[in-house]
Image: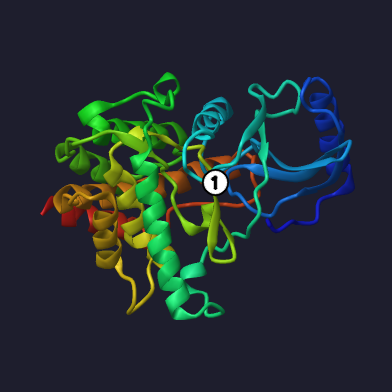
C-alpha cells in the first residue's frame, strides 16, 4: 500500500482524461479506471494509483510519469525495458504493462506497471514499532535481496539489448557520467565536487565482474507485506556495472540511518552477510572508492535538484549542505590516503 496525497480535482480530472484515452488505444487494456489518486511517494517521479476494472477482473496499477523537475533525469523506455526483462527473473519486481515513451499521450514520458501489495517505510530498520529481532531479520533480508539483484543472469534475461556492459571500467564510466551531470546542471561553481571528481578519477578501480546494478537500493524502494518483501521498486537508474557500486551506496555515511541498526547491525555486519550470501569476499579497498563515489553522487543529485527549483520545475529546493560536502571530502580523502 502506498500513501496518497490530496490533489486538486482539476489535475486529477486531467490525468484521468489522458489516461482513459491512452488505455483505450491499447488492445489489451479493456476496462474502466477507478479510484485514481496521486501517491505521496517518489522524489523523482509522479506516481498515480488506480485500478482497471473489467468483466469480473480488477487490476491494481500505478502510472509513473516524469515530473517537470526532480533530482534525477532518467529514461522511461529504459526502465520499462528493464522491468519487462526482470519479469522472468526471481526478483520481486512489478510487471511493466504499457509505455508512453515520449509523453505524446499522457503529457510526459510515462509507464504503467502493476501495483503490488505492501507498504514502504524508509526508516523501517529503526522503527521502534517493530521489535529488534524483527528489524535485524529485515536487515538480513534486504542484504540478501541486494545479493539477488547482483546474481541475476542479465545476459540470459536479454538485458544487454537495453543496457551497456562497461566491462572493467565501470567505476570510471559512472564517475564520468555523474561529472557530466554536475557540469550540465550546476548554476554555480562547486570546487569541492570538482576536487572529489579529480581525486576519484586518479584512483578508479577496475571491476572484477559485471552485474545488474540497481543504483538506488534502500528500504524506501522496497515494499513490505508484513515481514515479507513484496516488491523492489524504482529501477530508473538501473544499469550494468560493478556490484560494489550498490554496496557502496548502502554503506556510505549519508545513508547510514536507512541501512543500519545502532548496536545490532552495522556496516561490518552488512558487508559480512553480503559476503556469506553472494559467496565471495568484498574488496574493501575498492569498496572505499565506491563509498566516496556514492557520497559524491548524492551531492550531484542535489545540485540537479537546485537547477530544477530555480527553473520553476519543482517546489522543493535542493542544494548540497555543508554536511553533505564535508562527507564527500572526508570519504574521498579517506579513500585517497
Q: Residue furthest front?
A: 56
Q: Is residue 24 above or below residue 56?
A: above
The quadrant of the rendering that contains the N terminus is bottom right
Task: From this view, report whether residue 269 is shown above or below residue 161.
Answer: below
Local secondary structure at mark 1: loop
Along the line of sight, the residue nearer the viewer: 254 or 162: 162
Q: Is residue 179 visible?
A: no
**Horizontal and vertical percent for residue 242?**
28, 38
Drawn side of residue 67 relative to residue 33, left or right: left
CA neighbours of label 1 inside 10 A, class few (<14), some (14 to 19), many (20+): many
Residue at the left extreme of this rendering:
337
Quarter of the image where one finds residue 308: top right
Instruction: Measuring from the top left, give residue 64's x and y in whole percent.
Output: 66, 38
Position of residue 170 in the picture relative to residue 323 (left or right)? left
Residue at the (42%, 69%) spot, across then down: 137
Q: Position of residue 330 (x, y in %)?
A: 24, 59
Closer to the camera in the image, 56 or 311: 56
Q: Residue at coordinates 88% horizontally, 42% vertically from top-left?
A: 10
**295 horizontally vs 67: left or right:** left
Q: Residue at x 25, y 57 (%)?
A: 276
The quadrant in which residue 226 appears is: bottom right
For residue 115, say whether it is visible. yes
On the image, numbered disc 1 is attached to which residue? 233
Residue 33: x percent and y percent? 85, 38
Up the image or down, 209 lies above or below 220; here it is: above
Amino acid at each position: 500500500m502506498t500513501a496518497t496525497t490530496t490533489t486538486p480535482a482539476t489535475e486529477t480530472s486531467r490525468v484521468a482524461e489522458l489516461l482513459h484515452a491512452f488505455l483505450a488505444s491499447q488492445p489489451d487494456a479493456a476496462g474502466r479506471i477507478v479510484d485514481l489518486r496521486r501517491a505521496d511517494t517518489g522524489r523523482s517521479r509522479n506516481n498515480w494509483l488506480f485500478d482497471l476494472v473489467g468483466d469480473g477482473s480488477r487490476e491494481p496499477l500505478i502510472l509513473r510519469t516524469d515530473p517537470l523537475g526532480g533530482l534525477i533525469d532518467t529514461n522511461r523506455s529504459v526502465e520499462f525495458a528493464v522491468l519487462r526483462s526482470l519479469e522472468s527473473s526471481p526478483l520481486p519486481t512489478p510487471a511493466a504493462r504499457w509505455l508512453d515513451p515520449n509523453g505524446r499521450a499522457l503529457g510526459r514520458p510515462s509507464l504503467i506497471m502493476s501495483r503490488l501489495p505492501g507498504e514502504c517505510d524508509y526508516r523501517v530498520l529503526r522503527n521502534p514499532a517493530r521489535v529488534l529481532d524483527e528489524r535485524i531479520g529485515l536487515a538480513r533480508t534486504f542484504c540478501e535481496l541486494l545479493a539477488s539483484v547482483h546474481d541475476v543472469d542479465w545476459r540470459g534475461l536479454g538485458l544487454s539489448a537495453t543496457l551497456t556492459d562497461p566491462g572493467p571500467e565501470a567505476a570510471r564510466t559512472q564517475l564520468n557520467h555523474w561529472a557530466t551531470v554536475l557540469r550540465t546542471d550546476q548554476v554555480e561553481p562547486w570546487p569541492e565536487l570538482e576536487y572529489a571528481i579529480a581525486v576519484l578519477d586518479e584512483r578508479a578501480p577496475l571491476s572484477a565482474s559485471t552485474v545488474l546494478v540497481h543504483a538506488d537500493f534502500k528500504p524506501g524502494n522496497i515494499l513490505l507485506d508484513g515481514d515479507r518483501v513484496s516488491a523492489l521498486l524504482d529501477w530508473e537508474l538501473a544499469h550494468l556495472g560493478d556490484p560494489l557500486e550498490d554496496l557502496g551506496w548502502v554503506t556510505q555515511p549519508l545513508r547510514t540511518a536507512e541501512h543500519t541498526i545502532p548496536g545490532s547491525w552495522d556496516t561490518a555486519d552488512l558487508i559480512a552477510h553480503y559476503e556469506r550470501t553472494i559467496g565471495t569476499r568484498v574488496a574493501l579497498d575498492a569498496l572505499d572508492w565506491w563509498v566516496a563515489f556514492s557520497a559524491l553522487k548524492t551531492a550531484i543529485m542535489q545540485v540537479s535538484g537546485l537547477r530544477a527549483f530555480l527553473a520553476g520545475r519543482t517546489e522543493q529546493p535542493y542544494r548540497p549542505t555543508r554536511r553533505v560536502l564535508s562527507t564527500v571530502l572526508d570519504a574521498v580523502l579517506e579513500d585517497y590516503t
